[in-house]
Amino acid sequence: KAGVTQTPRYLIKTRGQQVTLSCSPISGHRSVSWYQQTPGQGLQFLFEYFSETQRNKGNFPGRFSGRQFSNSRSEMNVSTLELGDSALYLCASSLIGEQFFGPGTRLTVL
Amino acid sequence: AQSVAQPEDQVNVAEGNPLTVKCTYSVSGNPYLFWYVQYPNRGLQFLLKYITGDNLVKGSYGFEAEFNKSQTSFHLKKPSALVSDSALYFCAVRGNNAGNMLTFGGGTRLMVKP
């Protein structure tokens, strides 16, 4: 079974731009969660989608948004990028219980 | 609110020796506890979980963890460390009503020296 895939793997943007990251969960998994990983703040939960509905949301500004499609694929969008948004963005899918993580998208904001 | 503490930023151990990576948690209700490992430039790999049942949980690559409810701890252990175990380890907790939202500790870097 294929694992969680994230595209792109690396991204460089400049301040003020917006970015869209994509996540394809493991086949059959309906829950997709997003996390931000930075050296200073560690791993922080962004949001979770289940059956196209946002089920949980972390403490991030409204510039961070997401959505899930009927095939469970998910996207997250960050608008008006700031330098502090530079991070590894991890997506995880879950069927029951444990979460399986993708390799992440490394976003660098210049 | 739920929280996880990993009190050691780094743990150093010689190859062949036992290792322990510490984790304490705070959550309302019964906890769901997890350990993940991260290698450089990679995502997180699942090691093991505690949901209910035996306090000693066995996981991947020879790792195990001991759940202690009175001390609210979930320490990761391995009887004999390998150099290839060197990586970043994360403890995480999920509450009963949190969907799949995980709260992670700050991570502990494990260095196993030959």
Image: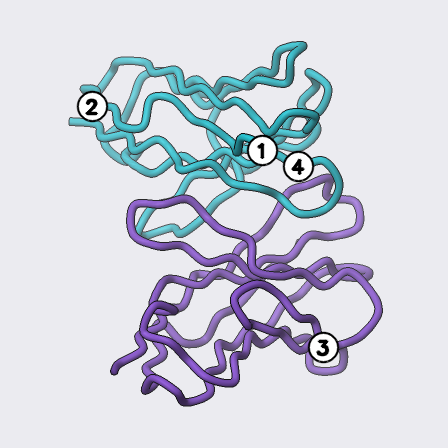
Discs 3 and 1 carry the same chain letter: no
Same chain, labels 2 and 4: yes
Q: Name the image quarter holding residue B57.
A: bottom right
Pointer 2 local density, CA inside 10 Å: few below 14, some 14–19, many at least 20? few
Residue type pointed to by label 4 = Ser
Circle 2: element type: strand
Which residue is the site of mark 4?
A94
Task: State which quarter of the image contains the C terminus of chain A.
Answer: top left
In the image, residue B49 lies at what x, y percent?
67, 60
Q: Amino acid at mark 3?
A: Leu
**Chain at tag 4:** A
Mark 1 sits on what residue? Answer: A33
Q: Secondary structure at mark 4?
A: strand
Give the labeled residue for mark 3.
B56
Q: Is residue B30 left or right of residue B92?
A: right
- State the image quarter where residue B15 is shown: bottom left
Distance, label 4 to label 3, CA atoms, is 24 Å
Where residue A105 sits, quadrant-wise, is top left
Q: Tell me the shade of chain A.
A: cyan
